[in-house]
Amino acid sequence: MVNDSVPSNDYVQLELLNQQLKELDQSIIYARDQMDHAHLAVLMLTALAKANPGDDMLIPLGNSIFAEVKAHNVKTVKFGVGAGVVVDKDLSDATSLMKGQLKELAEYQDQSSRLYDQVIQRALELQDKIEQTQKQNTE
């Protein structure tokens, strides 16, 4: 409920902060999801590097679906580089790239979490200001 004694821009600013929190929350969730995928990729690349020809392996396809395959001279993997372009990468290069992505995602998540905390702090301060103004005007 909007109180006429509280400047309307405070309510607008509080709503904008609320929207920013929702967007940051979605970004943090997305980063965590991407980190999970990158971590799984690193684990699979590491397992492939250790595999001997003829070893049975389960390759995750997503949603708890796995393909049972036999390792056969695995030295390279197909790596999507964007815009539908796929290139061959040797296992160590692919692993290094995925670890780099994992590090970047962790940094992004940390930055987003810090910003989230700052926005919450600002929203709480603004909420307190609104409540104080309402309290003063009812006295």
Image (tube, grey):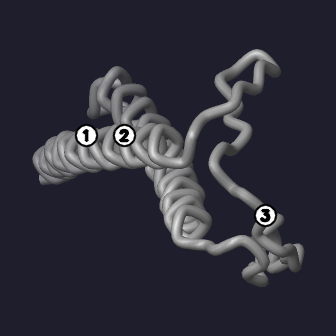
Percent x, y of residue 5? 28, 33
Camera-side residue: 20 or 34?
Answer: 34
Q: Is residue 120 left or right of residue 77?
A: left
Question: Which residue corresponds to the image point at 12% horizontal and 53% vertical from the top-left?
Answer: 139
Residue at 45 percent across and 38 percent down: it is 97
Q: Amino acid at mark 3?
A: His
**Residue type at tag 1:** Gln
What residue do we see at 50% from left, 59% from top? 42
Q: Secondary structure at mark 2?
A: helix
Callout 2–callout 1 Cβ contact below 8 Å: no
60 shown above or below 137: below
Q: Which of 13/106 is in front?
A: 106
Residue neighbourhood size for the residue with mark 2, other residues' Cα within 10 Å, grouped as few (<14), some (14–19), many (≥20): few
Q: Residue at 63% of width from left, 49% of height from top?
A: 75
What residue would you read off at disc 1? 111
Left or right, residue 115 beside residue 108: left
**Helix, strand or loop under label 1:** helix
Res. 72 mark: 3
Q: CA distance from mark 2 to mark 3?
A: 27 Å
Residue 35 % position (x, y)? 48, 55
Question: In this rendering, would 62 be left or right of 30?
Answer: right
Q: Earlier in the sequence, mark 2 or mark 1?
A: 2
Q: Which mark is residue 14?
A: none
Q: Secondary structure at mark 3?
A: loop
Label 2 sits on residue: 100
Mark 2 residue type: Gly
Q: Nearer the viewer, residue 78 or 101?
A: 78
Q: CB of mark 1 within 8 Å of CB of mark 3?
A: no
On the image, the x and y values in percent for residue 102 come to 40, 48
| Quarter where residue 6 is shown | top left
